[in-house]
Image (cartoon, grey):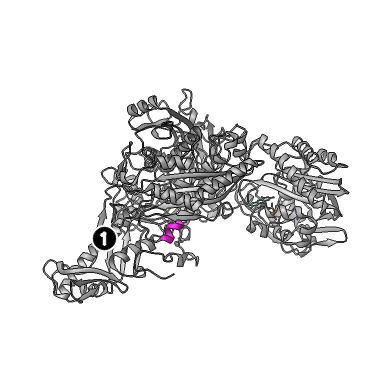
Amino acid sequence: MSTPMGFGRMHRKEDARFIRGRGGYVDDVNLPGMLYGAILRSPHAHARIVSIDTSAALAHPKVKAVITGETLAGLNLAWMPTLSADTQAVLATDKVRFQGQEVAFVVAEDRYSARDALELIDVEYDALDAVIDARKSLDPDAPIIRDDHEGRADNKIFDWEAGDKATTDAVFAQAEVTVTQDMLYPRVHPAPLETCGAVADFDKVTGKLTVWCPTQAPHAHRTLYALVAGLPEHKIRVISPDIGGGFGNKVGIYPGYVCAIVGSIVTGKPVKWMEDRSENLMSTSFARDYHMRGEVAATRDGKIQAIRVKVLADHGAFNGTAQPTKFPAGFFHVFTGSYDLRAAHCEVTGVYTNKAPGGVAYACSFRITEAVYLVERMIDVLAMELGADPAELRMKNLLRSEQFPYTSPTGWEYDSGDYQKTLQLAMDMAGYDALRREQAEKRDRGELMGIGIAFFTEAVGAGPRKHMDILGLGMADGAELRVHPTGKAVLRVSCQSQGQGHETTFAQIVASELGISPDDVDVVHGDTDQTPFGLGTYGSRSTPVSGAAAAMVSRKVRERARQVAAAMLEASPEDLEWAVNESGGAWTVAGTGAGKTIQEIALAAHSSLELPEGIEGHLDATCVYNPPNLTYPFGAYICVVDVDPGTGQVKVRRFIAVDDCGVRINPMIVEGQVHGGLADGVGMALMQLMAFDEDGNHLGASFMDYLLPTAMECPSWELGETVTPSPHHPIGAKGVGESATVGSPPAVVNAVLDALRPFGVRHADMPLTPAGVWRAMQGNPIRTDLAIS
Amino acid sequence: MQVPASFEFERAESVPHALELLERYGPEARLVAGGHSLIPMMKLRLAQPDALIDINGLAELSQLGVEGDTLVIGALVRHAALLADDAVGAYFPIFHEAERVIADPVVRNRGTVGGSLCQADPSEDLSAAFAAVRADAVIVGPGGSRTVPIREFHVGPYETVVEPGEILTELRVRIKPGAGSAYEKVERRVGDWPVAAVGAYLRTNEGMIVEAGLGLTAVGAEHFAAPDAEAYLIGKAAGEDVLREAARIAAASCAPQADQRGPVDYKRHLAGELTYRALSRAAERSRA
Ligand SMILES: Cc1cc2nc3c(=O)[nH]c(=O)nc-3n(C[C@H](O)[C@H](O)[C@H](O)COP(=O)(O)OP(=O)(O)OC[C@H]3O[C@@H](n4cnc5c(N)ncnc54)[C@H](O)[C@@H]3O)c2cc1C
């Protein structure tokens, strides 16, 4: 594959090191004298701590320190703020509130001794009743989980609403047809292959703290450490090296990170802490856990008029969801989806339960996964009620291209779209009518085949700083671009790749703006001492925000180059034209052959060439990009499944995914992102689940229990594309990192339920395991968030 | 990273040497074969043996072949080797069909037949396959060797008749004419342990069933077998109704437990459905 001058397919620059095993991850960081930490965790979901005896652990010959909540309380660090302005225990002092919660931290000479010493710590617990079923969390007799909050009398975190209730209720009251459906988007986990961890190194002499940590948001971490620990911010350096998958699991600050830092301060040595798989699954940010009731009002001929939603949101024991401050339910209120309707209203109630904190993770675009799942399931429920074809029903109700920019009933301004075209392309690729004929023939023979459709619109690229901040930090991103004398460039950005290929795509953005080869652009990221401030990579925001910053800073450089070129050519800057041909970019004098390439200009900018008054020389530039709006990628997905009527097993036979993410910088990388998200969707729809038994035991705490999909469960993906550029993004790109994770689960679930039509099944909750499917066929569906009994 | 507690490690040079090491380290020592059950348990600290005795170098436990009318499978034969062996596939398709759905290629390259049986997990696949074909297990100990019918091998979940100082050396299965076998498993995902699985072995003579073996796993079948259903089949023609009735009897005789793989009613349903499917294919093969 050759290297294009700008956009286009090229191999990922980072793959040269990854495929040679030369990536560098946190666990590869080894410093002289480094010690190892391990965390003692609660076996109980809810218990009062009576006493903690660490004497035997301290007596272990290789143990250097044992830190408890009491130690931290002395430093005012026993609790830390969460990204939702709640507090979370770093190490428990009063109670433990979920199974797997952090209770003590051992620092020892090696990993083995640290782990051995955990068994020497004696904790006496007084077990309490646990709140496991979210639907009972607000019962009058439910145990109060957060009795650390003064005056708290229940487990409610917030009530929140969006849309117009009165108008919506009025439309429902008049509606010819209404349908209602309860559904659960169960608790799932991003389960990145690399678990979370940190190496903390506090230098007592310089007072500088360096933290290596696989964070998706290094700058936000640095500022939070400064605010929480009171360390001066310029004395904190956060380095996020190569990350083995993030998916939102690596946005927040975990107690282990704080413990590693305290461990380093206490011992004066670097401390490494790496969690194991079960710790990752049990204690770090889960995703979803939305108990939803959807209602749709429509005309008898299938025109959707209004949607009403009620949600019970299980946030676990600490409200640690990560989303912009004014959006406690994330962007869930885009649940009107891709449809033209008159009114919408939702109410979301957030509650505490005795489970791990989290909620916004796993490529969810701040809860758009839940929103899209809800509306796409509801469309199928309505189709079943009306006896309508689900594709036709969607076609009829999709927004039309002339309606853009479109303001939704819950206040979102969709930037651009041509939805019918995209759905039609997916249907053509699938051979939709032929599939329906095949299905009819199979049904006559008693065979179960299903065709599921999902159409999604995302709202990504948070976001305009006047609306969006995280703990007061506005969501604009900086970029710095240096151009060396020979015309090679270094781009510094704040966002951090976890596999998205930023080193390639961002180089391509600069390359296309400057007319140089992407091979001549290095991208520096993941080190707060080396990069400008910005909020990081999640919510598909890198290309919409930092990518825009990369384009804008390149344009600034280009403008500076114009001034220098004018001096070189003894022409007026206004008379110069920018042009890119096969040999690269150049400023030329209009109407003449005279011109200077960007490389010639770069050399001159650093030379003794005399520059006009006010022109500084050099070409370097910085910028901050504050997005005017979110971008709205969309897509149409069609899934074909076969279900074994005797066993309930589902086989995904085909999956057609047509994505429109605006302009594609590197189509190969876009396709890779889509492939991964589709596999995630198959996993969530069919096998992934973290249920809890009534004592709060986590029933999905290993990869034996929490199943990730493999190539065997994935068909050969059939991808298509339409391109509707974003009108407000400098290069017309929209985000794509989460599109497929958002769009694929409802397509798979709709397909399975379509297969089960002969049984009159309208809905069954994910994951649709063989048992779940069989039970749905019996009319006795499984409640998937609790232990199967 | 999960790390085990500390332990001694010894590499056995021969079966007598292994027995001697077992004797020396006592009941808290464990043999390690493929390590794919034992090492995960040690990492999770569910097992903390004082010593591991590595038997991977013992070629005498790796034999796989036909001796007269008997298929001999050494305890150290890897899942992958059993799957790759043509004679095994020709005489006992049940083993190939079971192996194809046990774990994944990485695990199958290391995990062993003997380790699987000695682990005695109540969801173990090979236990059902060997129960169906009524294999014999050969065990050696300080006092010499003994042969135990496989249906007496398992004492309960994670418990077998192999005593602390003993080693399972091989499995022996009689090869008989007119036999057919098959294995059916439902798993939530490739590489997962079974929700339920059934192995069937049938011998027919002029259309009549003369020998029947049913092995069921993950559904609480005693000794992984369904003797009532087997007895019912003897002397009958292998038609659909007969096989359905045998499946019903087999399903009724198990005692599945609910877990995250499924509720009791579903597992019992599967026991019946898979018994029927396995019997049907075994019957077809017995006629071929
Ligand atoms: C991811 C994964 C998925 C799996 N999926 C399945 C599945 O779907 N179905 C299934 O049936 N199995 C499955 N397994 C188990 C797999 O088949 C194991 O390899 C097998 O259970 C154990 O074999 P081993 O050789 O690794 O035994 P080891 O782990 O080495 O030993 C297991 C036990 O047997 C003892 N032992 C071993 N050999 C002997 C001997 N010769 N004499 C006496 N005692 C002995 C050991 O001391 C130990 O107690 C899976 C395992 C993994 C890791």
For disc 1, the neighbor class at 10 Å (few under 14, some 14 to 19, many from 20) is many
Left or right, residue A33 beside residue B162: left
Is residue A503 or residue A714 the one in the foreground? Answer: A714
- Compared to residue A738, the image places residue A387 above or below, namely above
Is any part of residue A69 visible from this angle?
no
Left or right, residue B172 beside residue A436: right
Q: Is mark 1 within 8 Å of ligand 1?
A: no
Is residue A536 or residue A713 the one in the foreground? Answer: A713
> Which quadrant of the figure contains the C terminus of chain A?
top right
Question: Which residue is rendered at x = 88% and y = 49% of the image?
Answer: B205
Residue A400 position, x and y percent, is 35, 44
Left or right, residue A478 beside residue B279: left
Left or right, residue A8 beside residue A41: left
- Compared to residue B2, the image places residue B246 above or below, namely above
Is residue A217 or residue A327 the one in the foreground? Answer: A327
Kind of residue at badge 1: Val
Question: Which residue is rendered at x = 75% and y = 40% of the image?
Answer: B221
Mark 1 = which residue? A553
Q: Which chain is indicated by disc 1?
A: A
Is A671 covered by the magenta stretch? yes
Q: Main secondary structure of the magenta part?
A: helix
Residue A589 position, x and y percent, is 18, 72
Residue A713 position, x and y percent, is 57, 51
Is B220 covered by the magenta stretch? no
